């Protein structure tokens, strides 16, 4: 199972939740029911645990993100950048099995693939500040 692909799918789920205002359970179920999806490459337990943890601790996670933004407000972030930051912050705070530098690197890679050109350095800066605090 590929953790990078799982994290990428997790980011897409968080984005979908923020755009369509769906419950995370509905997003997970819709994905499972779509027969075109390739699930053997995905660690679905990792995704489910992470999405549940992010949703249950969203206020704590968002506060931590906001504390580490410089001259930004969380509601001004793109939905993609916010999803990436929520994943990495969740991993920092609640998933001690994943080293912080791995979370940062994965966040940067997601930003390179899915977000604006300036996002990888922005994500790196926010997460770097978070590690120092």
Image (spheres, rainbow, N blue to C red):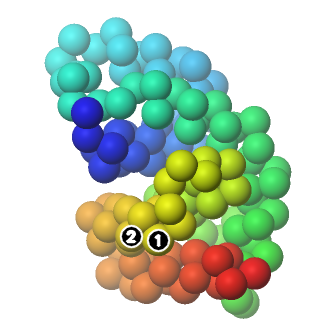
Residue 129 in the image: state x and y as whole percent. Answer: 65, 84
Q: Judge whether 52 appears above or below 71 on screen.
A: above
Q: Secondary structure at mark 2?
A: helix
Q: Judge whether 2 appears above or below 52 on screen.
A: below
Mark pair 2, 1: CA separation: 6 Å
Residue in view at x 39 percent, y 70 percent: 105
- Report whether residue 81 is seen: no
Residue 68 in the image: state x and y as whole percent. Answer: 72, 79
Could you tell me how many numbered marks the image carries? Answer: 2
Q: Which residue is mark 2?
A: 105
Residue in view at x 66 percent, y 42 percent: 54
Residue 44 in the image: state x and y as whole percent. Answer: 40, 26
How would you rate the neighbour count of disc 2 (Cα within 10 Å): few for under 14, some for 14-19, many for 20 or more?
some
Specify the label residue 101 is tagged with.
1
Q: Is 63 placed left or right of 69 in the picture?
A: right
- Report whether residue 45 is seen: yes
Residue 73 in the image: state x and y as whole percent. Answer: 73, 75
Along the line of sight, which residue is nearer the eye, 63 or 80?
63
Along the line of sight, which residue is nearer the eye, 50 or 112?
50
Q: Secondary structure at mark 1?
A: helix
| Cβ atoms under marks 2 and 1 closer than 8 Å | yes
């Amino acid at each position: 199972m590929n953790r990078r692909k799982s994290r990428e799918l997790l980011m897409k789920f968080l984005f979908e939740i923020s755009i369509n205002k769906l419950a995370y359970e509905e997003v997970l179920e819709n994905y499972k029911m779509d027969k075109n999806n390739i699930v053997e490459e995905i660690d679905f337990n990792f995704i489910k645990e992470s999405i549940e943890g992010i949703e249950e601790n969203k206020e704590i996670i968002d506060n931590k993100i906001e504390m580490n933004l410089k001259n930004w407000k969380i509601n001004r972030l793109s939905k993609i950048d916010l999803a990436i930051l929520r994943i990495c912050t969740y991993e920092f705070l609640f998933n001690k099995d994943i080293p912080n530098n791995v979370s940062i690197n994965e966040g940067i890679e997601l930003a390179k693939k899915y977000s604006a050109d300036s996002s990888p350095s922005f994500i790196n800066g926010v997460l770097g500040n978070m590690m120092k605090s």
